């Protein structure tokens, strides 16, 4: 549990920028990380979160020398270009693993591959990365890939969203190896996601109830829940202590708690306190 490297660096960068630029307007385009509590704390430090769509549609405009921070899971090439045109100071807080996928994408395109992407086409990370290519198709499941009419004999390079479910990825990888014989596939699920998925698999088997703590739009947290609930039906996704229903724990002995990579440790500790408090008072 606790912040992964990419989230920690993005949050530290934002607070540092705020600290050093008290006289300037500071914005983040999109949620820096997918967690409401983190966003609230940034706002308290004078950093405003701006909706990306509003910016693209021109409803929000920055003035020269404003500071704009780009979030941990990256932005699109189009947004970057618009910011350069508006002459703002850009701080790119994109995680190194997201940047790495962008670099692989450009390199593989140079080598003559057509890129295909495995991930959630509506997730900002995926939108951001594929914007650096041209008409890249995105597949969310093995079923989608099987049903597509793409020519299996072409030379493709498959890339994967950093927070993708490793089990679904393994099935897709096996299918690609058997059916796309001229293609290659890169494992680009990040280490933090991978480790947390392994840990939840183990934990879910050992406890009576699993609590997964994180933002409702956090991709890596949702994947932890998907894995846990398959193993242990008494798995619950909560954003904070207020969402925890203590009735879920009635008559249970072992409670496992885990959290997504963008969940502050504080949220987990508050949940633990609520549970322990309840039982101490009983
Ligand atoms: S989940 Fe992985 S890719 Fe996303 S910010 Fe954390 S380390 Fe980076």
Image: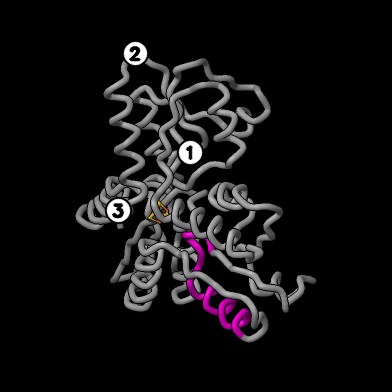
Residue 35 visible in the picture: no
Q: Which residues are magenta?
A: 160-177
Q: Residue furthest top?
A: 23
Res. 23 mark: 2
Q: Nearer the viewer, residue 155 or 135?
A: 155
Quadrant containing ligand 1 reads bottom left
In front: mark 3 or mark 2?
A: 2
Q: Which residue is mark 1?
A: 31
Distance from label 3 to label 2 (Cα)? 32 Å
Is 20 situated left or right of 130 in this image? Answer: left
Q: How far across and down, in percent of the image, does residue 126 sit?
A: 57, 53
In front: mark 2 or mark 1?
A: 2
Q: How far across and down, in percent of the image, does residue 59 sit?
A: 64, 22
Q: Is residue 84 magenta?
A: no
Residue located 46% across and 37% down the image = 70
Q: Which residue is mark 3?
A: 2
Distance from label 2 to label 1 (Cα)? 23 Å
Q: Nearer the viewer, residue 183 or 203?
A: 183
Label 1 C-beta lies within 8 Å of the nearest ligand 1 atom: no
- Asked if disc 2 and disc 1 are in contact, CB closer than 8 Å, the reply is no
Residue located 41% across and 23% down the image = 26
Q: Quadrant of the C terminus?
A: bottom left
Q: How is the image coloured?
A: one colour
Which is more N-terminal, label 1 or label 2? 2
Q: Nearer the viewer, residue 226 or 82?
A: 82
Q: Residue furthest front?
A: 111
Q: How far across and down, in percent of the image, does residue 210 sit?
A: 38, 66
- Asked if disc 3 and disc 1 are in contact, CB closer than 8 Å, the reply is no
> Which SS class for mark 2?
loop
């Amino acid at each position: 549990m606790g912040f992964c490297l990419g989230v920690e660096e993005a949050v530290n960068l934002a607070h540092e920028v705020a600290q050093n630029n008290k006289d300037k307007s500071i914005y983040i385009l999109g949620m820096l990380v997918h967690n409401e509590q983190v966003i609230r704390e940034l706002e308290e430090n004078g950093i405003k979160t701006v909706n990306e769509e509003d910016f693209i549609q021109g409803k929000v405009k920055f003035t020269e020398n404003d500071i704009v921070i780009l979030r941990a899971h990256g932005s699109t090439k189009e947004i970057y270009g618009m910011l350069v045109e508006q002459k703002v100071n850009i701080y790119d807080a994109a995680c190194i693993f997201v940047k790495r996928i962008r670099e692989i994408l450009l390199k593989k395109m140079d080598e003559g591959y057509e890129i295909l992407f495995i991930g959630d086409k509506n997730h900002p990370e995926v939108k951001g990365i594929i914007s650096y290519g041209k008409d890249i198709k995105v597949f969310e499941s093995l079923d989608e890939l099987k049903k597509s009419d793409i020519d299996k004999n072409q030379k493709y390079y498959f890339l994967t969203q950093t927070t993708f479910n490793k089990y679904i990825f393994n099935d897709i990888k096996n299918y690609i190896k058997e059916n796309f014989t001229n293609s290659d596939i890169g494992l680009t699920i990040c280490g933090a996601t991978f480790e947390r998925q392994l840990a939840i698999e183990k934990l879910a088997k050992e406890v009576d109830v699993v609590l997964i703590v994180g933002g409702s739009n956090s991709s890596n947290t949702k994947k932890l829940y998907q894995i846990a609930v398959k193993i242990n039906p008494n798995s619950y996704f909560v954003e904070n202590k207020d969402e925890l229903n203590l009735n879920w724990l009635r008559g249970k002995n072992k409670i496992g708690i885990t959290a997504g990579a963008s969940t502050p440790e504080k949220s987990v500790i508050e949940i633990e306190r609520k549970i322990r408090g309840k039982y101490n008072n009983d």
